[in-house]
Image (tube, rainbow, N blue to C red):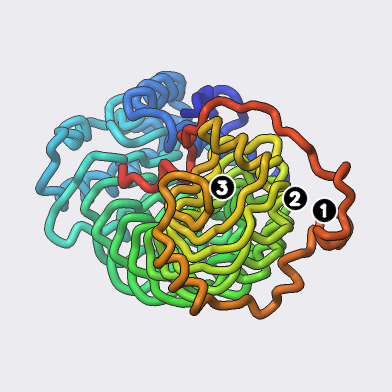
Amino acid sequence: MHRCPNPFTTFKTPWSLSLSNPMGGINTFFLFIFLTLFLVGNGEQDAQIKALQTTVGSSLATADGFQSVLIRRAYKTIQAFKKKITYDPKNITKTWRGKNICRDYKGFLCDVRPDVNQTAIAGVKFNNYNFNGPNLTLTELITGLPDIVFFHANSNNFTGSIPTNLNKLKYFFELDLSNNNFSGRFPTEVLRANKLLFLDLRFNTFVGTVPSQVFGLKVDLLFINNNNFIQRLPANLGNTTALYLTLANNKFIGGIPPSIGQASNTLLEVLFLNNRLNGCLPYEIGFLKKATVFDVGFNRLHGPIPRSFQCLRKMELLNLAHNRFSGVVPEAVCSLPNLSNFTLSYNFFTQVGPQCRKLIKKGILNVDRNCISGLPYQRRRAVCSRFFATSQSCPNARSLTLVPCRQGLSDGELASSDIESTAPSPAPAQAPRRGSYGALSPH
């Protein structure tokens, strides 16, 4: 698990960053916000927030005892919201008393807005508070806190609609509504939040389709897994700027769009697992030169592994298990230098070469329940025979031999010296704890 310093003490404040340089550095800053507030434990989060709260001064305090007029405005909003909460198992709202919000109120983070030199509510962190109440909605709360940079509310019982004025929140960069009770169609209101860098809607019960405009948002993280979306993946999927993209555990159908290759300069981890995807993998996946995780497990994909996968030089975890893939496992893919977890189980592969067998022996490559002669734990011969009697072909079979990192040459045109004969010996296979896989847990 990543451990990061407090972003508010290491970097500029969110407001000063957006004001002084709105186009530069912001992605790095908010990636650290994500790593701190999403990946570290709740105890550490609370300690970090408490430390920040004690550093916020009483800039431009009001005559009636509030730290600023912005805090006075926030006080009214918070007290109105407090009345809606009828279930508070951690007694969080008992701290929402008095006028010193920045010091006393759990779940709220303050900072000084440099453009007006006033203390304001910079962020809301309700993660795991499990708030509930009749018709517990967020519209009035978010609308009444116009200075917030982030709103994190994982694991509560919020419902209803999302505010329509997110575009008017000048500094709003992160929205986490995961593991709540939101339902219905995709909340198109988030498309108005044109400054978002982090959008997390996982573990709700959204249905229908995801608008193609979602993949045009300039986000660093996009988590929409564990809903009930059902559609073909939009053709513009590759337009996403996300570093971490998680679409797992939905009902997406069809193939992976070739446009995925357009995300070559940004995409680090992508999870398609446990959907209803079919067809063959596009060779354009080989353009993902920065990707470290690619997971299409538990789908209905078929065909061979594209030769372009040998271009995934930074790949660490590659999961194609529980599909209908077949053919020879490419030796060049087994030679990827950083590969530490390569899972091909429950497919119909027929052959592995010496390099792949080395990975099997090291526990890096799993080929259980395939059709590989001479290896243990394979499918029964009759099962393999039935599959190959009805197996499907790929419509653009020629493209599956292309190797884009070799200037478009097909694999057959490569010299043997172009492929590493041996790979470094990484640690035994163990799925690392990552941002994307962490998103598969509701909390």
Task: Please say if the residues under marks 2 and 3 sit with CB atoms less than 8 Å apart.
Answer: no
Q: Is residue 169 visible?
A: no
Task: Please say if the residues under marks 2 and 1 sit with CB atoms less than 8 Å apart.
Answer: yes
Instruction: Return the x and y of residue 217 as percentages of the image width and height.
Output: 58, 62
Q: Which residue is mark 1?
A: 405
Residue at the (62%, 38%) spot, across then down:
339
Label 1 packing within 10 angstroms: few (<14), some (14-19), many (20+): some
On the picture, is 318 further left or further right than 24?
A: left
Instruction: Return the x and y of residue 40 as percentages of the image width and height.
Output: 42, 29
Q: Nearer the viewer, residue 422 or 284?
A: 422
Q: Which residue is mark 3?
A: 318
On the picture, is 431 further left or further right than 86?
A: right
Residue at the (61%, 71%) spot, across then down:
257
Instruction: Return the x and y of residue 443 as percentages of the image width and height.
Output: 31, 42
Q: Which residue is mark 2?
A: 311
The kind of secondary structure element at disc 3 is strand
Residue at the (14%, 41%) spot, across then down:
88
Q: Name the amino acid, label 1.
A: Cys
Q: Name the amino acid, label 2.
A: Cys
Q: CA distance from mark 2 to mark 1?
A: 6 Å
